[in-house]
Amino acid sequence: MITAAQVEPVVPAPPAPRRRRVRWGQVAAAVALPLLLVLLWQVSAWIVQPREWILPSPATIASTGWDVRERLWYHAQWTILITIVGFALATVVGCLLAAMIARSRVAGLMLYPWIIVSQTIPLVALAPLLVLWMPDFGAMVTLAALISIFPVIVAGVDGLRSTDPELIRAVRTLGASPGWTWRHVRVPAALPRLFTGLKLAAVFAVTGAVVGELVASDRGLGALTRLSAGQFETPVTFAAVVILALIGIAMFLIVATAEWAALPYSRRGTRPGSN
């Protein structure tokens, strides 16, 4: 005979986590404001009718951009190349410096204050000097990397230093070596903050590329805006600015997608069945 004490209680299985669906209402709300601003701009242009070299309408900008699409693409390739290479350089060097600063107190005292001080220097003033010291491509990439490296270092250092000390103490008690603890505990714990810095750096890299092209280059969307504005080709200038904005958004989305793939646990709730 089986008594009540021998019967094990049945624990219900936790519900499977639901997949997060795309909420088209939120997407529509995000797109509605830019479309509304463009519509107001177009209506205002119809009513006021300003001269095109002062303030062209969105329709004029779109038409001109399509007419000079080959010219825009020629300059956009250069800007995209500089942005990607500068961002990659900032990511590699920034992560290495962040690891050195977080791992060594001496390196932190020697490097971190000077990294902070370097951000007070107007990097626009360094562009002509960089052109004197290295080729144009190297100067543009260096400038893009210098502008975008700071958030990578700061986010990396904060992430590595904010690892739960109880977790580190637990794995060390179980016999983990310092190297194993660094690779399997500190680095994964720092990834959420590091990706935040990388998303900022991806946008800043576009700014760095444009600044370099504005100051010391005859190719790229930054140089195109300078030349077209000087020749009163304002629609071309606006078209180049729109493409620059799209490049910045694309860079941000690429890093956000990498974060989505590298941190699957960030897409799920901490409790079973949480959305």
Image (cartoon, grey):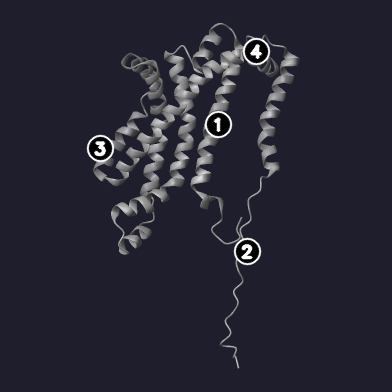
Q: Nearer the viewer, mark 3 or mark 1?
A: 1
- The residue that appears at 44% across and 46% down in the rendered structure is 191
Mark 1: give few (<14), some (14-19) or many (20+) Cα within 10 Å: some
Which of the image's four quarters has the C terminus?
bottom right
Mark 3: give few (<14), some (14-19) or many (20+) Cα within 10 Å: few
Query: Mark 4 or mark 2: which comes first in sequence?
Result: 2
Query: Mark 4 or mark 1: which comes first in sequence?
Result: 4
Question: Label 4 is placed on what type of residue?
Answer: Asp
**250 over 131 or under it: above or below:** below
Q: Which residue is mark 4?
A: 67
Q: Which residue is mark 2?
A: 15
Question: Label 1 is placed on what type of residue?
Answer: Ala
Q: Which mark is residue 110?
A: 3
Q: Which mark is residue 250?
A: 1
Label 2 residue SS: loop
Q: Is residue 193 left or right of residue 246?
A: left
- C-alpha gap between disc 3 and disc 1: 36 Å
Query: Mark 3 or mark 2: which comes first in sequence?
Result: 2
Q: Is residue 36 left or right of residue 121?
A: right
